Image (cartoon, rainbow, N blue to C red):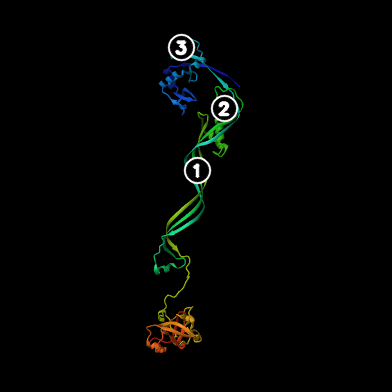
Amino acid sequence: MSGERDTRRESQITTDTKTIRNWGETHGMVPVRYEEGSETHVDMVPESAVEEHHERRDWDAFESDMREHEMVVVRHDEANEMEVVDRHEAVSHGAITNEEVEEALLEGETVQSEFTERAVVERTIVEEVTVESEVTNRELIETDTVDAELISREVEDCTVTNVDATDAGIEALDTFGTGTRSELACDVEVTIDEAWTVTKENVEQVTIESRVVEADVEETDTLESDTIRETVDLEGVEQTVLRGELVDSREAADRAIESGHVESRFREDDAIETHLIRSQVVGEDLSVRRLVTGEVTDAETLTSETIAHRAVESDIVEPAEYDRELDVAAAGTGTGVADTESLEADEPITTEESTADTATPSQDDKGKTVVNASGDEIGMVAAVEDGQMYVDPHPSMTDRIKTALGWSDHDEDTYPVDPDHIARIERDEVVLGVDREG
């Protein structure tokens, strides 16, 4: 449904550059040129309305543009509005019937006329418009971590290097006790896997591009002066865009639009660009792997236990050194009861009743050291045959001891020992009743 709209008002029409410049400077208008489709247009717009597609012109260049495209400037007195129109259109719309007046206009004079604006008005009822929108640009302005929570921490690998192998000697005995703390230097590398939940507040500038892809139109007339820009409600597009994932609720979207925090405009290709700055709190799950390195110098003894025991050296010492007394009669003759407190728990106790058993040699005694009653080593058990013990004598054994044992005339390398000469047989040695040479 369409019709004609006639608006008649007093206007001035001119091509005079000086007049046009005076009008422009008085009302804050600047000359521009722009391309639309395949056509070049010239216009005068307010300083605040200059857009990216406008090419600003100086007044001399503007005069050339008007002359080239046969344009005139119309100034409407009541509203102090100015528009650049085709000369033929101006003549047809103005009450210019005198050829002399028209000629004066062409000569650059200013003509006062009742100018009639006549444009075709179209009426379009749109039931529904389908708009497709996408975020075309996101610029992070600021980010701030407001919370972090450790979910788990696990040791993946541990490597110890450069362990101090210096022999501490007898001083190391102080570290054997359970719970003892000491210094032990080494380098440690530990790989740790962590899981975190981090809360951030991000502020970003967002650009959204929207296009009308479908419109259900109930009624429309031939489009002559209006375009799609007159049929699309920018605020409605903004509300539709914001109600997506950009804000949490419809109320938040409405508040942003009412406060002027959202700006939208049509581009030359009739796409709608929406610009806004959004603050959003987001939660992120992070997986972090760390390599922890350092030097360890502190050690604590958790347990200490003996896993092996062996005799390294044996000797007989003076009892007085340990505030002890021995029963000399029992030790010399093999009779009597020894002081059991002076013996180790795992050594045999020799008594008068047990002497016969412990003094009887066996194959298990082969290789044991043989000592006299004074503890001097005189040889080694070389063999035991039918209860008879044979000794390989020590080279330094004196003739007196050999005589006491009846070995003086024996020519072999080993000598038998009379069972009467055996005082006792212990775990590591055989003790004879024969004393050292006195």
Q: Amino acid at mark 1?
A: Glu
Residue at 47% x, 58% y: name it.
158
Crowding near the residue tagged with mark 1, few <14, some 14–19, many ≥20 C-alpha atoms within 10 Å: some
Q: Which residue is mark 3?
A: 103
Q: Amino acid at mark 3?
A: Glu
Task: Give percent across and percent down for residue 14.
Answer: 45, 16
For residue 24, above or below residue 263: above
Q: Can you tell which quarter of the image residue 124 is in?
A: top right
Q: CA distance from mark 2 to mark 3?
A: 41 Å
Quadrant assignment for the N terminus: top right
* Label 3 with label 1: CB-CB less than 8 Å: no
As helix, strand or loop, the secondary structure at mark 2 comes to helix
Quadrant assignment for the C terminus: bottom left
Residue 201, label in figure: 1
User: Of 104 and 65, which appears nearest the observer?
Assistant: 65
Q: Earlier in the sequence, mark 3 or mark 1?
A: 3
Q: Which residue is mark 2?
A: 231
Q: Earlier in the sequence, mark 2 or mark 3?
A: 3
Q: Amino acid at mark 2?
A: Thr
Q: Earlier in the sequence, mark 1 or mark 2?
A: 1
As helix, strand or loop, the secondary structure at mark 1 comes to strand
For residue 69, above or below residue 386: above
User: Of 406 and 319, which appears nearest the observer?
Assistant: 406
Does the rendering let one see residue 21?
Answer: no
Q: Nearer the viewer, mark 3 or mark 1?
A: 3
Task: Give percent across and percent down for residue 130.
Answer: 58, 32
